[in-house]
Image (tube, rainbow, N blue to C red):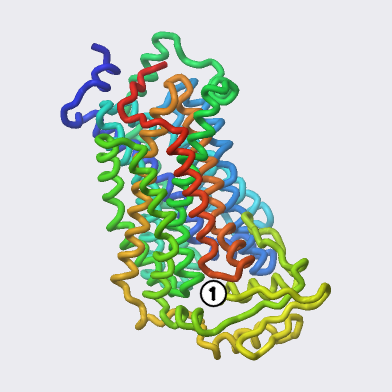
Amino acid sequence: MSVMTASQDRAGGMTSEERMVIFASSLGTVFEWYDFYIYGTLAPILAAQFFSGVNPTAAFIFTLLAFAAGFAVRPFGALFFGRLGDLIGRKYTFLITMSLMGVGTFFIGVLPSYASAGIIAPVILIGLRLAQGLALGGEYGGAAIYVAEHAPKNKRGLYTSWIQTTATLGLFMALLLVLGIRSYQGEPTFASWGWRIPFLLSAILLVVSIWIRLKLNESPLFQRMKELGKGSKQPLTEAFGNWTNAKIAIFALFGATAGEAVVWYGGQFYALFFLLLTAKVPAIQAQIMIAVSLLLGTPFFIVFGWLSDRIGRKPIILAGFALAVVTYFPIFQGLVHYTNPKLEAALASAPVTVIADPSECSFQFNPVGVAKFTTSCDIAKSALVSRSVNYQNEAAPTGTKASVKVGEQVIQTGTPDFAKQLGDAITKHGYPPSANLADINYAMTVILLTILVIYVTMVYAPIAAWLVELFPTRIRYSGLSLPYHIGNGWFGGFLPATVFAIVAATGNIYSGLWYPIVIAAMSFVVGLIFLPETKDRDITTM
């Protein structure tokens, strides 16, 4: 019996080789996500270090642009490294992607600041971020496929679920390390040079990860395919130029990965964004509560991976979509209730109206941070959104400067002290500038955040096995990677910008939730109708 057949048919316990495969693949992917997240966590400091040649607002915008670039290029990394993985193998491709990510992260840690090197510093920084985004586009598919192609067919969901924990663990490690170093050093020292430590530590993780992965053998299915001479010579053309295969990728995108992405980003990243910017919870308390919820929720990746081997991938993922659609509004309303009850009371009792010429009101979608919204309507709405104030829209005659009505007080935009007048008025009407620590119900907040993380585990834990099983071996790396990274890089990565634009347009702090809800509902319908259950599928098909 070949290695491949033995691996697919064996139903006993996990072998030492399989444990090493899972450990090495998961460790490398945790490391890549850690690299990706520390940039986002340290964005304000990086803005001061590398974009100090412009004003602070522009500096932060350019820093976010560099971060967004990493998301934007992920599908291109998926195409390039997906093709490479189908041509030369899974092992060597994700060795390349991991090395590229690690080297990029280390060099950010030693990169001279704008003050000492001038314009070349931010140029190199953006180049390193693009390299990291490309690398991440190739890493996930390789790791997931490598583990799945080593797994017994009745344990593919369980084995690949370990890979699914890596994004959450990478975020958790980034948050924990940054919080620890920042608390130990103090803010002045950390802002001066301590921020470099998390980047430099990646060199140790890189060396360990490469050393472990070099000890692994190539995937048995890929080896067998090459021995038989059945590999694809043009995997991209075969995967996306052939309608039979292309439609699988399209259905995988709209019926699985798009919904998974918005539930994942909504339950982890947007939840943190919402606590900080909408509920006005101080950063340290918000990050600690998110970290605790991640710690409590992460084991459910393994639970739902295991369960998917018994009842199927499809019912668990679709159930996660459905729960998000039905419960997102009450959960996020609950977060405000338990963290900032004064804000909740103000939202209910203090009506605010923006009176503006509708032609001046933009849809403030700004995914890469460079668009400017300068009309009086946009200025008024942005000011209210930043203070988490609900408002109604009232049309004014054409050409009229926007004004804001708070109770009986009308505040005109364009006056020199507009921001102060508005701030004083909304504070007077009960809108708190930040959450009162004594008012926060930490236990209930963590419970709600943990529920959101459990939704993430439902949609994310089985998806690697589902995607692997949808595509034949010869084009698996290419076919899987592109829909995954379009879903997660674009539908998920641009979720905060989309949510902000919807909130600014409608005047309701919860209305941005319609974005993840509509996308999750779409994926539920498309997945239910067009995607098959695959848990018993033979993935040895070439």
Q: Residue at x 31, y 62 (%)?
A: 292
Q: In the picture, residue 44 is in which quadrant?
A: bottom right
Query: Can residue 102 be seen at all in this image of the molecule?
Result: no
Query: Can residue 337 be seen at all in this image of the molecule?
Result: yes
Q: Give how far across and how far down residue 489 sits, in percent.
A: 53, 45
In the image, farthest residue toward the top: 228
Dot 1 amino acid type: Ser
The quadrant in which the C terminus is found is top left
Position of residue 124 relative to residue 437, above or below, is above
Q: Give how far across and how far down residue 196 sits, in percent.
A: 47, 58
Q: In the picture, residue 354 is in which quadrant?
A: bottom right
Residue assigned mark 1: 388
Q: Give how far across and how far down residue 448 sits, in percent.
A: 34, 64
Q: Residue at x 23, y 21 (%)?
A: 9
Q: Residue at x 48, y 64 (%)?
A: 273
Q: Residue at x 45, y 44 (%)?
A: 524
Rate crowding at label 1 as few (under 14), some (14 to 19) or many (20 or more) other CA atoms within 10 Å: many
Q: Nearer the viewer, residue 90 or 396?
A: 396
Position of residue 358 relative to residue 468, above or below, is below
Q: Nearer the viewer, residue 356 or 381?
A: 356
Q: Nearer the viewer, residue 24 or 208?
A: 24
The quadrant in which the N terminus is found is top left
Is residue 429 found left or right of 311 in the rendered image?
right
Is residue 189 found left or right of 165 in the rendered image?
right
Q: Give how far across and how far down residue 331 sits, in percent.
A: 39, 64
